[in-house]
Amino acid sequence: MICQREDELLDALGRGYIGAELDAHVTTCDACTELREVAGALLEDRAHAVAEATIPSAGTMWWRLQMRHRQEAQTIARRSLFVGQAATLAVALTLVIAIFGSQFAGEVRTVFSSLTAFRISGPVLLMLTTWALLAPIGGYIATRQK
């Protein structure tokens, strides 16, 4: 059974003061009586935990704050370095393609035609090439530190 005054009782328990009218209601309502026992025990445990909690010294808190700032700065630096590396790689690939594009395409055609003489189909060759290009990238991602 759910009582309409349970929220009011929870608020009163949180404040630590239950008025006479609400107290009279709790004595007549089984749901509110059970809620008062359970919530009261939980709030009492919380109050004991707060009272017994040890507060670290100012030096410890200062050290923790400095460590957190250092870790956040390292995270930001890693992120910006990764973006810079990706941009550098993109520019380098663009330059290589711009400078050696036609010669490279001719060499790829020559290699492809020589591999088809070994009866390697186009999709299999594409799969092997993709694997050969993505394997080092996957290895880098797997071994990098977070």
Image (cartoon, rainbow, N blue to C red):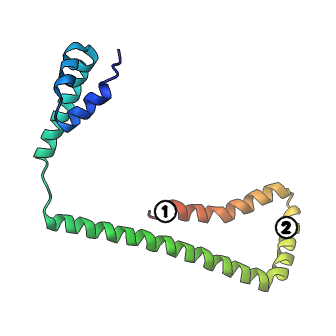
Residue drawn at x 67%, y 76% is: 90
Residue drawn at x 45%, y 74% is: 77
Distance from Cα at disc 2 to Cα at disc 1: 33 Å
Choose top left, top right, bottom left or bottom right for residue 18: top left
> Mark 2 = which residue?
112
Q: Nearer the viewer, residue 30 or 90?
A: 30
> Mark 1 = which residue?
143
- Residue 50 in picture, x, y percent from top left: 15, 45
Looking at the image, residue 113 sits to the left or right of residue 81; the answer is right
Single out the residue that lies furthest toward the front.
21
Choose top left, top right, bottom left or bottom right for residue 32: top left
- Residue 52 in picture, x, y percent from top left: 10, 45
Residue drawn at x 85%, y 67% is: 112
Type of amino acid under label 2: Phe
Of badges 2 and 1, the one in the foreground is: 1
Looking at the image, residue 103 sits to the left or right of residue 144; the answer is right
Single out the residue that lies furthest toward the left.
52
Label 2 crowding class (10 Å Cα cut-off): few <14, some 14-19, many 20+? Answer: some
Label 1 crowding class (10 Å Cα cut-off): few <14, some 14-19, many 20+? Answer: few
Q: Nearer the viewer, residue 57 or 14?
A: 14
Dot 2: element: helix
Q: Quadrant of the N terminus?
A: top left
- The disc, 2 or 1, on the residue closer to the chain's N-terminal end is 2
Type of amino acid under label 1: Thr
Res. 144 visible in picture:
yes
